[in-house]
């Protein structure tokens, strides 16, 4: 069975860049769940956080994710970093027609790379990105691990390759194909 693929992991782990390249390698559509949410809500994530708070954002995130999985063609979805927080999202991530790839990295490494883009209000407070990411890692690492079919460590690719995201995408695509072949056997 060809599956939906969902990339999960903290902000800065490369879900969007790697997801696009994995989708190209697998010949599937790519969807960035944050972009889809903004299109469906017709508002930016920054506005949603400001007006409705994080809880309002999480409601929309769960609705968007449900809708994306109903897309009949299997696609590659980059989930937002907090997708795993809601139990209903974790139940969807565990569906047999969904393969979850966890891009794992430690918070100090991520803090050195992450960009405080407008769709990341959690990084815009007074607390440093390193502290925010350390807290989010403590809260979420076990949830990412709980839903992951495949876990790939990001940092070794940055230490050992001239084009880390290409190397990472190749590894993820190869492991997904092996996983799908194993599921069919
Ligand atoms: C969030 C991560 C963001 C975005 C929102 C909340 C989080 O997505 O969904 O700002 O809770 O970690 P990225 O992980 O794609 O940056």
Image (cartoon, helix red, strand yellow):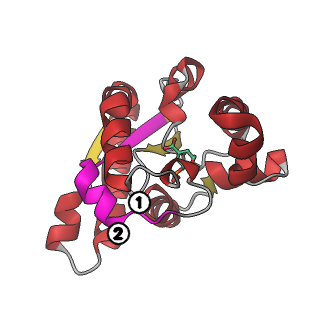
Relative to 78, is 144 on the left or the right? left
Q: Residues within 10 Å of mark 1 (few under 14, many from 20)?
A: many
Q: Image quadrant of residue 12?
A: bottom left
Secondary element at tag 1: loop
Identified at 53% across, 35% down, the residue is 83
Q: Is residue 57 visible?
A: no
* Residue linked to disc 2: 165
* Residue linked to disc 1: 14
Relative to 104, residue 141 above or below: above
Relative to 99, residue 47 above or below: below
Q: Image quadrant of residue 145?
A: top left
Q: Residue furthest front?
A: 126
Identified at 63% across, 54% down, the residue is 31
Of residues 128 and 11, which is closer to you in this image?
128
Identified at 36% across, 42% down, the residue is 102
Q: Earlier in the sequence, mark 2 or mark 1?
A: 1
Q: What span is in magenta? A: 99-116
Relative to 34, residue 144 above or below: above
Specify whether residue 106 is painted magenta: yes
Relative to 139, is 77 on the left or the right? right
């Amino acid at each position: 069975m060809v599956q939906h693929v969902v990339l999960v992991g903290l902000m800065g782990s490369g879900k969007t860049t790697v997801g696009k390249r994995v989708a190209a390698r697998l010949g599937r559509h790519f969807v960035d769940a944050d972009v889809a949410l903004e299109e469906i809500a017709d508002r930016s994530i920054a506005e949603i956080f400001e007006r409705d708070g994080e809880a309002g954002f999480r409601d929309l995130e769960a609705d968007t994710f449900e809708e994306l999985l109903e897309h009949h063609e299997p696609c590659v979805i980059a989930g937002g970093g907090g997708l795993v927080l809601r139990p209903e999202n974790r139940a969807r991530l565990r569906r047999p027609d969904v393969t979850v790839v966890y891009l794992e990295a430690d918070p100090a490494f991520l803090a050195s790379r992450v960009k405080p883009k407008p769709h990341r209000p959690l990084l815009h407070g007074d607390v440093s990105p390193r502290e925010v990411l350390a807290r989010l890692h403590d809260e979420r690492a076990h949830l990412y691990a709980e839903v992951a079919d495949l876990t790939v460590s990001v940092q070794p690719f940055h230490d050992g390759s001239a084009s880390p995201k290409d190397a990472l995408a190749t590894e993820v695509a190869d492991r997904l194909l092996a996983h799908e072949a194993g599921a069919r056997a």
